[in-house]
Amino acid sequence: MDLTEMYGSLGVSPGVLAYGQAALERLKNRFQAIDEIAEYNQGKVLHAMQKNRVSAACFAATTGYGYDDVGRDTLERVYADVFHTQAALVRPQITCGTHALALALSANLLPGDELLSPVGAPYDTLQEVIGIRESPCSLAEYGVTYRQVDLLPDGGFDFDGIRAAIGEKTKLVTIQRSKGYATRPSFSVSQIGELIAFVKGIKKDLICMVDNCYGEFVETLEPSDVGADMVVGSLIKNPGGGLAPIGGYICGTEACIRRCAYRLSAPGLGQEVGANLGLLPALYQGLFLAPTVVAGAEKGAIFAANLYEPLGFPCVPNGAEPRHDIIQAVELGSKEAMEAFCKGIQAAAPVDSFATPLPWDMPGYEDQVIMAAGAFVQGSSIELSADGPIRPPYAVYFQGGLTWYHAKLGILLSLQKLVEAGLVTL
Ligand SMILES: *Cc1c(COP(=O)(O)O)cnc(C)c1O
């Protein structure tokens, strides 16, 4: 069986494969640049593990209170070194990215303080955390106010608006690196650095937090290298490397992280408690693999843009522009096309390939959401997945792929399903 026949057995027609191979020919230089970033970041992770003397003893399971958990404490020092911060909180008890972000915010904002987002509306699930959409236990309920400055029409920062929005009460600035479910550009680390320098130039003691979800290891620098006081993310996205079964991280200044630890466990207990429940081998090994996994996912995202854009579907980012996260938005223009796309991603999965994704109501999201994923870790979005809210412009957000080859198959199959549904002609 040759490769064309192998793809045929997986459901990809020779025409779709040929269309894909032609797109790939044009991407050689970009893929090489991605490999070079992955190589650098692999070195960064290895250096942090060696410096902190990671050993087999770090993999031991602890239960109960988890006092003196060497593996947990070492992993946190490794994360702090990878992100070049004073401290880190990396825990399976942080259940997801939203939890990590809610923790970082609620630990560092007190009643009467104001939170500012200078980059437009935050990710859907954070709107309830903040209280933009009313929710019990939101920051608003505890007397933390919120201000937002939208991006300019060209996607740039509204520096005048931001200056005007920073006041007496402004305590913490939240910057979302990745676009999430918006069709705005994601920010480069250097843009984030510029924004942080600007706001700290206006008010020196502002705490700058970056929602780093989906951005880790895409560049050689992280937001914490350019002035962020906290970087926050999920372990079932980039830094878990597909192996972490749960968890979140916050890396940042000693002062911020200490408060996060007290908020996560209890005042007085902080970072001293929290058993690792035997999850540490996956957390260490996932971090070790993360630079490579992120590179594969990024190649998949670029491939998708270069497949769909020439067919007339707007892509964010477009096929040529630089990347700052692993998410690819493809505006498909209709609910039917979103369903066909997701069907293809699902059919390519190693797990649950036989399932059909359908739009559904999801907690934390305002519109119905369609999700395609056949993952080893439920809900993992560093594994190949596609999702999006059913609302104009009917964009699917495509991300992940533990290997580039799997990402490639998923994208080819998504196109195959659109062709079969008569929504695209090659
Ligand atoms: C995924 C994501 C979150 C929330 O993470 P969950 O793990 O899904 O709770 C927050 N912000 C951004 C930009 C994200 O992509």
Image (tube, rainbow, N blue to C red):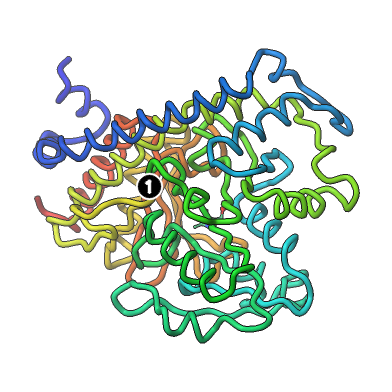
Q: Where in the image, quadrant-wise, is ligand 1 located?
A: bottom right
244 or 287: nearer the viewer: 287
Residue 230 position by quadrant: bottom right
Q: Is residue 76 left or right of residue 10?
A: right
Mark 1 residue element? loop
Q: Is mark 1 within 8 Å of ligand 1?
A: no
* Residue 372 placement (x, y as % from top left): 43, 47
Number of numbered discs overlaid on the protein picture: 1
Q: Residue at x 67, y 54 (%)?
A: 99
Q: Residue at x 70, y 20 (%)?
A: 58
Residue 332 position by quadrant: bottom left
| Amino acid residing under circle 1 | Ile
3 or 306: nearer the viewer: 306
Residue 220 position by quadrant: top left
101 is higher (above) or lower (below) than 234: below
Residue at the extreme bottom of the image, as rendered: 164
* Residue 281 placement (x, y as % from top left): 63, 22
Q: Is residue 251 left or right of residue 341?
A: right
Report the residue marked by disc 1: 326
84 is higher (above) or lower (below) than 128: above
Q: Residue at x 54, y 69 (%)?
A: 200
Tell me the quadrant of the picture where the N terminus can be found: top left
